[in-house]
Image (cartoon, grey):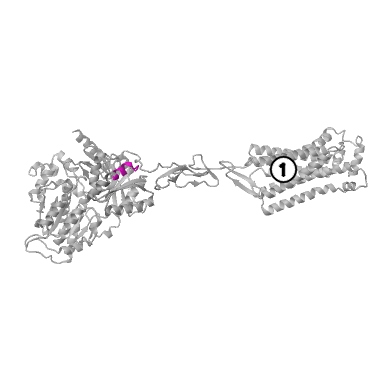
């Protein structure tokens, strides 16, 4: 009672949900263990009679009980014949009838063949007996193949309505047989698409060891290479029972030891495949099985592919027969046969008596009986795949006879009402027939015409002990473009499975963003390690084969999942350091200009005249340029500013240093001259020291010109110097010429320092040799320190150090040389007079 209540509750929920979402879904009642699990073989021998005639040739083997699958076939046959016989546009005034024989086993067929029993040879007849036009056989292909030989001997063509099998298409072996079921032309592609959709890449496969399974495995290997799907194992079920037992444990261990959670099952069900899963049933293997509709069967009351994680089934897509349900609800067995065997079948199946008025029709049967019928067969009140093929087979025969009827004015008749036709001519017509069935599906007997294959995808969930849920969750259409062939309903998947995300089946855990796949040596491509991306490369998706390098102006974040915009870095005027250095440069420039103004104003005073006014003016002007030179280093670098930085710095510092050298030599000459007639006096009077400045400057200009002509400075963006920054600096171009220029300037400064140092002990009334030597000591110390710091500093800090050295060395020259003189001129003017220093002034006049 509780199970019935649970069933009705789940049924209502399923029907409500299905009405909202419009896919096919229905509950199923499992068969009990006493019922046979595989449908028995059924033969339907077709013949015709004039007018509307009731079928009177239902022949059941009463020693065996028909399975629900066989009954589904019989009702599908009657449904098709009822539609055809009542259709005035197909075989008008002619009835299509059939003789039914079921439960014919292999041994039974062999005994028939040995005894040549007449009732099993459709066209083995006496003069007044019926001849059959064609025999519909199925659903087990081996029985059709064996029985087909007997049909061939009796000159009766055979139309197979079971699942397509390539062996039955060999014309040389079966010239009299044709198949109506479609090929599994795109099945491998469909299953691969489903595997890719669920992000599975590590699956197992179980196939039968025959052409059907091997061909599918070959197609699968071709498809999986293009979709990065790998086989964890392939378990092949042998046909030979002795070999099967030898491989039993090996195949079982393959399934159980593999990390693959998804297993694909395909092959010939009539081999040891069904027996293998019957053996595995008590082991309760927890895998997600993926297979086709022929494996959607029961073994001892449970699904053949039993799994708590569910089963995915691919079934050939066909439209629902809307009239089939009404046909089952209103049909009366006595309308189709007078045979008592059908009445017994009806009573045994519905558990109700036909003569009773309360059960004269199915709709009047008790609710318990009705529910049992609704879910007794695997497809409820809809047609199974095999039943649908049988339905189309009946229509194919009818359309074939109708086409022949249109081409023949008068059908040949025998003495009775039975119409006679050449069976082989019917078969030749049948092989090329094409039509559209009442459901709107296109049916073609020629397999070459069946180019596009469509599949419905079902999910089957087990509800122990008595129920199961089968729900359509998607479909596959091969005629659509790639990436549009598979359609899956996420809502139906979530409702059916209860999971927002399906269980994974992968060889290696997915590599998160920031990592890349690194193949494991000697293993499949789906097995890999996850390694971090190289520096400044990212992976923003899972399982990326290669990391993507960030653009030049971007850098990878810490997790290496996306690129960030680099901060452009240079010594800008807005920076506190740049602003400080700019103010310092301008202040020193203004102070130097003020000293120049003071010197010009007091140009006739002894202290200005005694130090060679012209050289002092040149030195002050060059120092102003030296103080302004750092402004070229501050701000966004460009090519002109980079060129001017190096050349201006080199030339103005050469002028300043050579000016100090000229002043030093002038002082030395002034105090070394003791005899007016000697050569030194002539050099001093002629102003020879003043030529030092242009000579030294020209040499530096030649070096700078060669530098600019060979490898001039240029703007360089360095992304490696500082993480997350683009350092924009001026590249020196030729480092060799840069050191030549700097070395020449250093040599000049060193020479000046030596000369000034040697003259430090001369009389110091107006002797600035001490100040000159000290200023050059400061100058040389600054630039020696710069060379030590230059190689250990990066980015705008290097530019700031260079600017600071320029300012420090310039300030050293300026303060050491001119600060004492300004002190005397501005604060001690009484010392700066001719009366106090008359002797010295006379000597100074001789200098000028």
Q: Main secondary structure of the magenta part?
A: helix
Q: Quadrant of residue 402?
A: bottom left
Magenta-colored stretch includes residue 604: no
Disc 1 crowd rating (10 Å Cα; few below 14, some 14-19, many 20+) is: many
Per the rendered image, the range of residues in magenta is: 250-260
Q: Nearer the viewer, residue 197 or 40?
A: 40
Q: Nearer the viewer, residue 602 or 639?
A: 639
Residue 504 seen by the camera: yes
Q: Secondary structure at mark 1?
A: helix
Q: Position of residue 732 (x, y in %)?
A: 66, 48
Q: Position of residue 551 (x, y in %)?
A: 53, 47
Pointer 1 residue? 628
Q: Is residue 611 above or below residue 432?
A: above
Q: Residue at x 89, y 36 (%)?
A: 833
Q: Position of residue 304 (x, y in %)?
A: 24, 44
Q: Nearer the viewer, residue 801 or 471?
A: 801
Q: Position of residue 437 (x, y in %)?
A: 22, 55
Q: In this rendering, would 307 be left or right of 541?
A: left
């Amino acid at each position: 009672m509780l199970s019935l209540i649970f069933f009705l509750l789940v049924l209502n929920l399923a029907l409500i949900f299905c009405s909202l979402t419009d896919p096919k879904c229905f509950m199923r009642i499992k068969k009990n263990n006493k019922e046979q699990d595989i449908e028995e073989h059924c033969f339907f021998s077709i013949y015709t009679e004039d007018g509307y005639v009731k079928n009177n040739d239902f022949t059941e083997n009463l020693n065996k009980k028909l399975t629900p699958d066989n009954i589904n076939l019989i009702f599908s046959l009657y449904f098709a014949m009822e539609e055809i016989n009542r259709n005035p546009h197909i075989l008008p005034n002619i009835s299509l009838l059939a003789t039914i024989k079921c439960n014919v086993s292999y041994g039974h067929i062999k005994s028939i063949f040995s005894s040549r029993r007449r009732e099993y040879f459709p066209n083995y007849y006496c003069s007044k007996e019926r001849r059959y036009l064609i025999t519909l056989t199925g659903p087990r292909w081996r029985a059709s193949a064996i029985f087909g030989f007997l049909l061939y001997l009796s000159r009766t063509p055979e139309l197979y309505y079971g699942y397509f099998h390539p062996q039955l298409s060999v014309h040389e072996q079966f010239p009299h047989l044709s198949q109506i079921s479609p090929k599994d032309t795109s099945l491998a592609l469909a299953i691969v698409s489903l595997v890719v959709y669920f992000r599975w890449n590590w699956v197992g496969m179980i196939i039968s060891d025959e052409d059907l399974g091997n061909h599918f495995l070959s197609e699968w290997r071709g498809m999986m290479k293009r979709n990065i799907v790998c086989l964890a194992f392939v378990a092949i079920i042998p046909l030979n029972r002795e070999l099967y037992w030898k491989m039993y444990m090996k195949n079982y261990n393959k399934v159980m030891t593999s990390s693959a959670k998804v297993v694909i099952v395909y092959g010939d069900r009539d081999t040891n495949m069904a027996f293998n899963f019957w053996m595995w049933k008590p082991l309760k293997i927890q895998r997600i099985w993926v297979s086709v509709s022929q494996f959607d069967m029961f073994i001892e009351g449970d699904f053949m592919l039993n799994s708590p994680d569910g089963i995915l089934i691919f079934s050939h897509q066909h439209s629902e027969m809307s009239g089939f349900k009404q046909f089952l609800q209103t049909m009366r067995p006595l309308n189709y046969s007078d045979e008592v065997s059908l009445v017994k079948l009806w009573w045994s199946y519905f558990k109700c008596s036909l003569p009773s008025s309360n059960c004269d029709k199915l709709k009047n049967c008790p609710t318990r009986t009705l529910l049992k019928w609704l879910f007794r067969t695997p497809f409820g009140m809809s047609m199974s795949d095999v039943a649908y093929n049988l339905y189309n087979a009946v229509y194919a025969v009818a359309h074939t006879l109708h086409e022949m009827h249109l081409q023949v004015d008068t059908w040949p008749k025998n003495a009775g009402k039975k119409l006679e036709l050449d069976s082989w001519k019917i078969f030749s017509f049948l092989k090329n027939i094409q039509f559209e069935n009442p459901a709107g599906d296109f049916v073609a007997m020629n397999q070459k015409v069946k180019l596009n294959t469509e599949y419905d995808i079902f999910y089957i969930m087990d509800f122990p002990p008595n129920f199961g849920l089968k729900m359509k969750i998607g479909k596959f259409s091969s005629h659509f473009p790639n990436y549009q062939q598979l359609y899956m309903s996420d809502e139906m998947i979530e409702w059916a499975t209860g999971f927002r995300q399906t269980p994974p089946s992968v060889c290696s855990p997915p590599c998160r963003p920031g990592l890349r796949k690194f193949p494991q040596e000697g293993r499949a491509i789906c097995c890999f390690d996850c390694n971090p991306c190289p520096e400044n490369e990212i992976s923003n998706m899972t399982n990326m084969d290669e990391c993507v390098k960030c653009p030049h102006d971007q850098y990878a974040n810490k997790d290496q999942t996306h690129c960030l915009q680099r901060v452009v870095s240079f010594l800008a005027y807005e920076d506190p350091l740049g602003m400080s250095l700019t103010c310092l440069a301008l202040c020193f420039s203004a102070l130097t200009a003020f000293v120049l103004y003071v010197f010009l104003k007091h140009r006739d005073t002894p202290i200005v005249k005694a130090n060679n006014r012209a050289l002092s003016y040149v030195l002050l002007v060059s120092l102003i340029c030296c103080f302004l030179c750092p402004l070229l280093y501050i701000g966004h670098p460009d090519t002109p500013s980079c060129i001017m930085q190096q050349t201006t710095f080199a030339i103005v510092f050469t002028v300043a240093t050579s000016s100090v050298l000229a002043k030093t030599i002038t002082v030395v000459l002034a105090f070394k001259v003791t005899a007016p007639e000697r050569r030194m006096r002539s050099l001093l009077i002629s102003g020879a020291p003043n030529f030092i400045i242009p000579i030294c400057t020209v040499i530096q200009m030649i070096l700078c010109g060669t530098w600019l002509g060979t490898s001039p400075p240029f703007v360089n963006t360095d992304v490696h110097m500082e993480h997350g920054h683009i350092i924009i600096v001026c590249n020196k171009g030729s480092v060799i010429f840069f050191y030549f220029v700097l070395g020449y300037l250093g040599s000049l400064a060193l020479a000046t320092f030596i000369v000034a140092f040697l003259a430090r002990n001369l009389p110091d009334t107006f002797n600035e040799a001490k100040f000159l030597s000290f200023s050059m000591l400061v100058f040389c110390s600054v630039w020696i320190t710069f060379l030590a710091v230059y190689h250990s500093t990066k980015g705008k800090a290097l530019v700031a150090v260079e600017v600071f050295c320029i300012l420090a060395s310039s300030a050293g020259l300026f303060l050491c040389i001119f600060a004492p003189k300004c002190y005397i001129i501005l604060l001690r003017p009484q010392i700066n007079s001719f009366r106090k220093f008359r002797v010295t002034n006379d000597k100074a006049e001789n200098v000028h």
